[in-house]
Amino acid sequence: MSDHVFSGRSGAPVTVSEQSMSELRRALRGPSLVPGDAEYDRTRAIWNAMIDRRPALIARCTGAEDVARCVRFARRHEIVLTVRGGGHNIGGRALADGGLLVDLSELRRVDVDVERELAHVGPGATLHDLDAATRPHGMVVPSGIVSETGVAGLTLGGGFGWLSRRWGLTCDHLVGVEMVTADGDVVEATDITHSELMWGLRGGGGGFGIVTAFRFQMRRLPDPVTAGMIVFRDEDRAEAMARVRACAANAPDELGCLLRLGAAPPAPFLASELHGQPIAIVVPCHTGSPEAAERDLAPLRADGRAVADLVAPRSFIELQSMFDAGEAKGRRDYWKSEYVTELDDELAEILLEASRRLPSPSANIKLFQLGGAVARSPVGSTSAGHRDARAIVVIASSWDDPADDGTNIAWVQHTWRLVHDRSGRGGYLNFLTEDAVDAELASSLAGVDLERLGRIRRTWDSDGVFAPPGSDRAAPAVTRRGGESASPTIAAM
């Protein structure tokens, strides 16, 4: 029998006796893993292959009781505690070397209360799990655009997607949680019982406790929606961007739109001579009537210049999985994002020029339309930042060989700086990479009362159980430490 070494919250190693470790593992209802166990490496792997960290213990929790045991253990020994929900977060918040990983990824159950229009969602659920439960009832919780994204991390950091312009962010639909506190207690929070905590949980990044159950207000959305890809060749990409700008200027709330600049994939609906060439893909999603969709999408589809037009009535679940293949688990990924006020001519040219110098066939630039209900929510009504932004730009690359890290990261960072110099706003909290600096963290919460976030954190975690090692415990919920961005106790997407 030998002792176990964890990373301590102070930054120094912490030795935990075999007896203490065994007592915890026996008390847990779910299985637990340590380095060397057969399933350890598979279990610790998350979506972004750039993140390769080795927790000292992985606790595959079965519910709040297991989580509470882990929290009390981490508090007693003052060791680093992290949480995994869907494990889809770009910065790898779910993992820390030498930490105790509270793994919630098996808690994927979603129960739908049709009469009250509520969805009860486990902390490990993905958007696929959520949609699979809600769509048979003609209901939906507005969420993201990739079905393997985790509901927990998406919600705690805001959450935007196809339905945001019509109904707002994912966090706007959060009406209740079950949360394990820093004392290892289990509390129920709503706007009535713990209104300040609920405010902080709606987009501020978490870090107040570990949410073990979410409750969302659903929306009624009948199938089909009108959605799909409109593809423009290289010489028409500027025209495609102009059409997106014109369409967005007068778009109804029922219309959301994504623009993607990148290389043409070897897709059967594209001529072979286009494969690998620069293209623009416009993806509208219209949730109004077919007649309204035809009218509102006409500016995007005019004069037949598109080389492919796949817009058609389709199920919302089909739309949600449209980009899954391009976001597959196990590749090396690096992103930067920036909120923008408008897509003017200068910004459009920056994006077009950068997309002609892609470091990888999978590298791309996306622009997602915001506004509508997102902007109408009063500033300060939640802890989500950048309510007034009209769009968000995401510069991303994906590759396989670690030898290509430098080239891909440099392209993303250079392109992002050009966009940031134009915008000066900041990026999306959920898209912060592990090397994010303090200024990026603060700017991701533009428009948010950071002092209020700090007070909530001190109320619920006065001893810094959920604080990153070496951070200022009096700081807001989002802080930085070397090797990780934001609070490590956010359930990662």
Image (cartoon, rainbow, N blue to C red):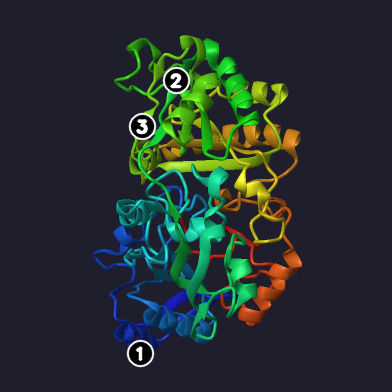
Above or below for 202 versus 241: below
Callout 3 touching callout 1 (CB < 8 Å): no
- The residue singled out by tag 3 in the image is 313
- Figure quadrant of the N terminus: bottom left
Instruction: Indicate the position of residue 63 as horizontal and vertical percent values.
Output: 36, 76
* Near-viewer residue (248 or 325): 248
Element carrying mark 1: helix
First along the sequence among labels 1 and 2: 1
Q: Secondary structure at mark 3?
A: strand
Q: Position of residue 444 (x, y in %)?
A: 67, 52
Residue 247 in view here: yes
The residue drawn where x is 59% and y is 26% is 247
Q: Position of residue 260 (x, y in %)?
A: 51, 29
Q: Residues within 10 Å of mark 2 (few under 14, many from 20)?
A: many
Depth check: give the residue in front, 36 or 239.
Answer: 239
Q: Quadrant of residue 70?
A: bottom left
Identify which residue is drawn at 56% across, 58% down: 172
Name the residue type under label 2.
Val
Residue type at mark 1: give it.
Gln
Say the numbered circle drawn on residue 19.
Answer: 1
Which callout, 1 or 2, points to the residue nearer the camera? 2
Q: Is mark 3 in CB contact (under 8 Å) with mark 2? A: no
Q: Which residue is labeled 2 in the image?
A: 231
